[in-house]
Image: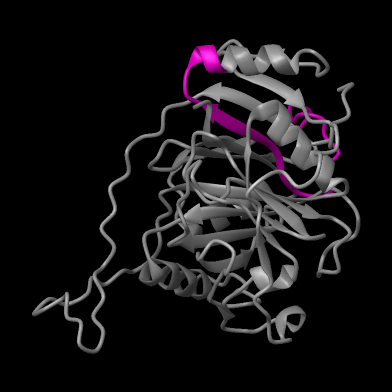
């Protein structure tokens, strides 16, 4: 194993205090705040850092607009970090901090980092569910939740102009695994030390979807909660606090089985409550979704126009590499 998942998301935001208030209401635990920076630390130990988008301390990147400006990946030990840093240094300019963090710029324009990180153990106890003829909760009332408290960062998503080359970089240079492919729309990648269906999604920035304009842009980050009840308690709390509700409402993705609820976020893009995603390992067989939007949702409360057409089961199992990955472009 090497990369275990997301250690930190570093945002460049237009309004620091408004973004702080959003994430506090969203349920992220505040660690510390200053006039120039706000830090949240989730129960698993991963972090969200907010800085002004014109802060000279933010790394240079090609990302347009507010949102995540740098993704720092957690690496399981120092030797794995050194192997990755040595490989990247062949054609990437790397910069080291005193704490050992390695920063670099990918060949598709996104700033990233590597940091030794051991996730804290998170203990969850989702509520058992009854069904006709199947009683598992007898003489026991469900817990009442008042709001959501995310436990960790499951994945991050960017719209990338050359998403296939970006996919090649992540796989060839950082050891990410392809989990699923939406033809012409995006590639779902899993860090090799994680069991999340995907920890990184590269969307085609020119795909015929709302908000795609061919530019490298932050799309959303997924914050993991326990179950459906926690998602909706969080959604209701956010609306009571005056935040704009989700455009799609509650839904379940087809591609990774996960429940979702996206909220427009003043820090950029969207913040997603997620639960009940598929967990996979190296025995997983990647799939190619030839009808790409079929992968998006099994159902959604507010069905968006781009998936109103009834889907068809058209998927292919990629039991072997069916085409050569495009080479990444070095020089950064």
Residue 293 at least partly seen: yes
Examine the rendering and report whether any part of residue 17 can be seen.
no
Q: Foreground residue, 212 or 179?
A: 179
The colour mode here is one colour
- Relative depth, front residue between 7 and 21: 7
Residue 8 placement, left or right of 235: right
Depth check, front residue: 68 or 296: 296
Instruction: Answer above or below: position of 42 versus 81.
Output: below
Q: Give the residue furthest to the bottom.
A: 132
Above or below 204: residue 34? above
Image mark count: 0
Q: Residue at x 41, y 33 (%)?
A: 119
Viewer-nearest residue: 145 or 314: 314
Q: Quadrant of the C terminus?
A: top right
> Which residue is rendered at x = 51% and y = 13% of the image?
78
Instruction: Provide residue 94's location: percent of width, then percent of height.
Output: 75, 16
Residue at 72% x, 71% y is: 293
Measured as percent of width and height from the top left, residue 165 is found at 83, 40
Q: Residue 240, how many percent across, how many down?
A: 49, 75
As for residue 57 lying within the magenta part, the answer is yes
For the record, the magenta segment spans 55-80
- In magenta segment, residue 251: no
Please say if 171 is above or below 228: above
Most distant residue in the left direction: 139
Image side of residue 275 versus residue 125, left or right:
right
Residue 6, position as x, y percentages in the image: 55, 38
């Amino acid at each position: 194993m090497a990369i275990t998942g997301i250690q930190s998301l570093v945002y460049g935001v237009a309004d620091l205090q408004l973004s702080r208030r959003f994430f506090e209401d969203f349920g992220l635990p505040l660690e510390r705040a200053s006039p120039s920076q706000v830090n949240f630390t989730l129960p698993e130990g991963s972090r969200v850092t907010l800085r002004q988008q014109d802060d000279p301390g933010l790394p240079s990147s090609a990302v347009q607009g507010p949102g995540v400006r740098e993704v720092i990946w957690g690496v399981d030990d120092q030797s794995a970090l050194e192997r990755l840093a040595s490989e990247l240094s062949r054609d990437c300019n790397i910069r080291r901090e005193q704490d050992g963090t390695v920063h670099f710029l990918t060949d598709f324009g996104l700033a990233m980092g590597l940091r030794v990180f051991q996730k804290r153990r998170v203990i969850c106890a989702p509520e058992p569910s009854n069904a006709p003829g199947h009683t598992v909760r007898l003489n026991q009332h469900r817990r009442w939740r008042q709001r959501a408290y995310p436990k960790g960062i499951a994945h991050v998503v960017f719209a990338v102009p050359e998403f296939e080359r970006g996919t090649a970089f992540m796989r060839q240079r950082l050891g990410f695994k392809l989990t699923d492919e939406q033809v012409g729309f995006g590639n779902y990648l899993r860090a090799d030390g994680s069991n999340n269906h995907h920890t990184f999604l590269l969307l085609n920035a020119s795909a015929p979807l709302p908000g795609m304009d061919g530019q490298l842009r932050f799309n959303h980050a997924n914050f993991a909660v326990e179950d459906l009840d926690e998602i909706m308690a969080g959604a209701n709390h956010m609306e009571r606090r005056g935040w704009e509700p989700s455009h799609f409402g509650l839904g379940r993705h087809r591609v990774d089985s996960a429940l979702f609820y996206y909220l427009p976020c003043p820090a950029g893009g969207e913040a997603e409550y997620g639960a009940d995603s598929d967990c996979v390992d190296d025995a997983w067989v990647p799939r190619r979704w030839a009808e790409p939007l079929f992968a998006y949702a099994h159902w959604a409360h507010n069905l968006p126009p781009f998936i109103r057409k009834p889907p068809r089961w058209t998927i292919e199992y990629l039991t072997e590499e069916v085409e050569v990955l495009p080479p990444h472009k070095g020089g950064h």
